[in-house]
Image (spheres, rainbow, N blue to C red):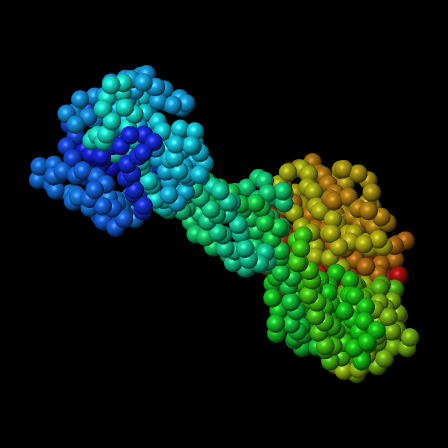
Amino acid sequence: MTVGERTQRIPYFSVNLRPHPTDSSLVIPAARIEQARLRIVACTTLATAMLCLLMPATSTAALSFDTSGCTASTYAMGPGLPGANLLSAADCTIDFGSDSGDAHLRMYQTDGAGVAMDGVSDYALGTADWAPNGSLFGACLRAASTPPTGGWDTSGDGSCDADDGDPWNPIPATAAGSAGLVAEFPAGLHSVDLRFGVQLAPGQAAGSYNGGVTIDVIQPGPTAPTSTTLPTISGSMTVGSMLTSTDGSWANGVDSYAYQWRRCDTAGLGCVDIGTNAPTYTLVSADVDATIRMVVTATNVAGSTSATSIPTGQVEGIAPTAGTAAASGTPQSGATLTAALAGAWTTGNPSGTTTYRWRRCDAAGANCVNIPLATASTYQPVDADVDATIRVVVSRTNTCAIGCGSAVATSDPTDTIDGLTPTAGTLTITGRAVPDEIVSANPSGWTTGSPIGADTFQWRRCDASGAACSDIAAATSATYVIQDADLDATLRVVLTRTNSCGTGCGAATLTSGPSAVVAAIASVATPATTTTSSTTGTVAVPSSAQVGDVLVVVITTRDGSDQDITERTTSHGTKYRQTNNSDRIAIALFYRVVTGAEQASYTFGWTDGRGTILTMLAFAGLDTASPIGGYTEGSGTGTSQTAASALGTAARSMLLATFCVRVSSGSYTPPTGMTEIVDMNTPDTTSSVNTEQFIAGGTTGTRQATGPSSEWAAQMVWLRPR
């Protein structure tokens, strides 16, 4: 028996056997025998005149017996097994029921006493005829509706006649012996006609005999499903569409199906699993350009088998669609325009990329040109756009093998782009207020306007307070060379910035504040100072010193009247005068004309390390050939300290007065008409000095300062203008 087979047994069947070829017949006209084998083998079980049907405990097959077509004279029936009278004399048809499944029929032979028949081995299957000393009886199977695919009926016509080439076969003597008589049936519903005949042994009396026959219906063991037709996929191959797969066709019965969708390359290879366990699948963006396959797995109790569909065509994309585009925002230079999309825009599938191209057009929106680098979703109009109109072209594009493309929309033109009027910030004048010096107009915080405006300048000469101004002829550039006519006056400059366009342009005007009063000589740098108690001192050159300026160094030192104060590092400068006070105070003055790049500092020295102050001044407007025209000096003790009248004759010269007193701290009252520019004390309290310097316009006159009461010295020089 095949592993997994289930047997439905009809034992102890007694039939009245007639001599061959006269035969007895048992017709089973409606037995469901699908892909079955009919086998007759011997059985030694005692056979009484009865028919018994045994079913597996798990079977639910409905059993019934049809009396039509049978007569009591055909069979000799007996009572059933103890407790089960299953058959009456007229019964002859067995219905296996709708759930019996595939089955075999198998028959066993017994004699009336339950003794095995002899001589089975004398007769091989397929012999031409039954030889003497053969079996008690043989059997012929005739399939009333469908001939078996193998078995006893060799005639091909489904009969069991004597002229059929002897389709009769002996019944094996034992159930455990030969495979017996086996007939295979295809799937389907069949009627079976079993015929039995007897071959008399030598000396056996002619007539009819009762023979015990047992029939087994053997349901085959389960077989895994077998694919007979591959699954097929239907539906639109456009992304977003739903595909549906059939199960395909299967043999051997299927209890359940499982589904696996797969995404593959264009050749249907390199597949990966997608989707869920369902016979439908909706195409997504990742499927575009791929092919799709379905794997259906059929399962029954015997196992599972998979079948894969052929690949579909490539999945097609969907091109984007366009709506409308607009350039929204204020149509003005410097404002922001934004590409606004509306209407039936779609992204396409796979999603497309959106690009922008801004275009400059004439006032009518025609004759457009692409604006360089203007490819973002926003755009700020520039000077070149003023009085023009702007359009934006929006393109949305996706890419795939089939179905993709581009959608394009161009906005209506904007109104003409308005300009922007310049705005004023601040306006100052830089430069030295000295004749022959160049001063400049310096605007700050102004806007250019759009388009960029043009600047015009007008220099004006004003009184010392900056009022009563008048235009200076031909002074209309951003710079101005100060003239002698400007002495004792101040300067102003007027800046006007103007642009022109259809709408939005205009002018901005601003007048600067007044310059310093123009003088022949000007102190042009904050004095650089240093103190020391050593025998040398270094003083820095003011960073604002320019070519043509004169640098003046004044050194005041305590107990230095018997010392010669000199420049130590180099000899670039000129020592003009050293003033002493009876061995207590010394004042030395040096000067140098700037002719090129200056070193950062200069070093001076003396022999006695006491409190010393070094000051470096820078002047513009001096006569570089002879910057110092003369000097006066004085010394003494007390609070009234006087520098005698300087002997100067040049107009518009300047006085520089230096006062030094031997105290640790103090303060001077400036001489009349002079301005203090330096006030220094040395930090050394044991040998300290206080130095103050003053300047004033003029060439002559005595200058007296009031300061601390102690030993003092004073020196005044007049500076010669160009």
The one nearer the camera, 591 or 356, is 356
Task: From the top left corner, tell me how far across and down residue 302 is, in percent.
Answer: 35, 36
Instruction: Tell me what residue is drawn at x 90 percent, y 77 percent.
Output: 473
Looking at the image, residue 178 lies above or below residue 93: above
The foreground one among 392 and 439 is 392
Q: From where the camera sits, is residue 344 visible?
A: yes
Location of residue 210 (image quadrant): top left
Q: Residue at x 34, y 44 (%)?
A: 191
Identified at 43% across, 29% down, the residue is 165
Residue most toward the left? Answer: 83
Q: Horizontally, is 678 left or right of 250 in the view? A: right
In front here: 431 or 577? 431
Q: Would residue 309 appear left or right of 438 to someone viewing this image?
A: left
User: In what quadrant of the picture does the N terminus appear?
Assistant: top left
Residue 504 location (% of width, % of height) = 74, 81
Quadrant in which the C terminus appears:
bottom right
Number of marks present in the image shown? 0
Residue at figure coordinates x 25%, y 50% from the top left: 68
Q: Is residue 422 left or right of residue 16?
A: right
- 681 relative to 437 in the view: left or right: left
Based on the displayed image, in which of its 4 quarters is residue 180 positioned?
top left
Percent position (x, y) of residue 439? Answer: 82, 66
The quarter of the displayed image where residue 416 is located = bottom right
User: Which of the pair 523/399 is nearer the observer?
Assistant: 399
Image vertical order of residue 387 relative to residue 691, above or below:
below
Is residue 508 visible to the viewer in this orientation of the structure? Answer: no
Residue 185 picture location, percent across and down: 39, 38
